[in-house]
Image (tube, rainbow, N blue to C red):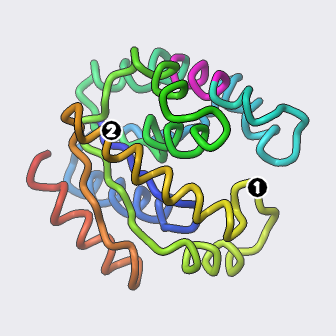
Amino acid sequence: MFIAFEGLDGSGGTTQISMFEAALAADGRAVCRTREPSDGPVGRLIREQLAGGAVGDAVFGMLFAADRRDHLDRTVLPARARGEVVLTDRYFLSSLAYQSLALGLNRVWAYNAEFPAADAVVMLDLEPGECLRRVEARGGVRDRFETLEQLERISRAYEAAIARCAARGDRIVRIDASGSADQVHQRVRGAVWPSL
């Protein structure tokens, strides 16, 4: 299977993908864990720009699509061919939500139309204010999307993206991301594990 973990910054995606990966490994399953932006050359460029580079918002949609093509070819598709469960921290839905703020949903959809849907998308639902509290608590440098106003805008954009993806038949599993990491993990596991 190919499973994407999605949600606002601070919703717990990295924590939940780590916990799910550990559960799969403990069950003896071969796992490929990855992320977007990827660790490939285009992904590294995106990370630099998110941290304060000079690339404008309109360019990000194209960069993310280029990174996704490279990520699929280098990592995701080979791992699936080997029979591994592929877990990605962000995928198609993130582009639709984040890049549509500057480019509009239709344009970002067109950039990504050729890419396969994940077998399941775990959408971690958490209020923007709580996401921001978590981001602030972890410290470090924030990127351009980690303000309350931006998180609220992205939350609305996610809803539009989810509706569009659901209409084409994507499997999106909505998970309440409030509570402890263990509580959220049990919700994720209960929703996704039976289909593995």
Position of 186 relative to 81 (above/below): below
Could you tell me which secondary element the residue under label 1 belongs to? loop
Specify which label sits upstream in the sequence, 1 or 2. 1
Q: Position of residue 144 (x, y in %)?
A: 77, 54
Instruction: Give yes or no for residue 170 being in the magenta stretch.
Output: no
Residue 169 location, quadrant: top left
Residue 119 location, quadrant: top left
Tell me the quarter of the image containing the N terminus: top left
Could you tell me which secondary element the residue under label 2 belongs to? helix
Amino acid on which disc 2 is placed = Arg
Position of 82 relative to 33 (above/below): above
Residue placed under numbered mark 1 in the picture = 143
Residue at 28%, 38% (x, y): give it. Answer: 85
Contact between marks 1 and 2 (CB within 8 A): the answer is: no
Residue at 30%, 34% (x, y): give it. Answer: 118
Q: Which mark identifies residue 177?
A: none
Amino acid on which disc 1 is placed = Asp
> Dot 2 surroundings within 10 Å: few (below 14), some, or many (20 or more)?
some
Given the current orientation, which residue lies at the most extreme left position? 194
Residue at 50%, 50% (x, y): give it. Answer: 157
Residue placed under numbered mark 2 in the picture = 164
The foreground one among 132 and 25 is 132
Q: Which residues are magenta?
A: 62-69
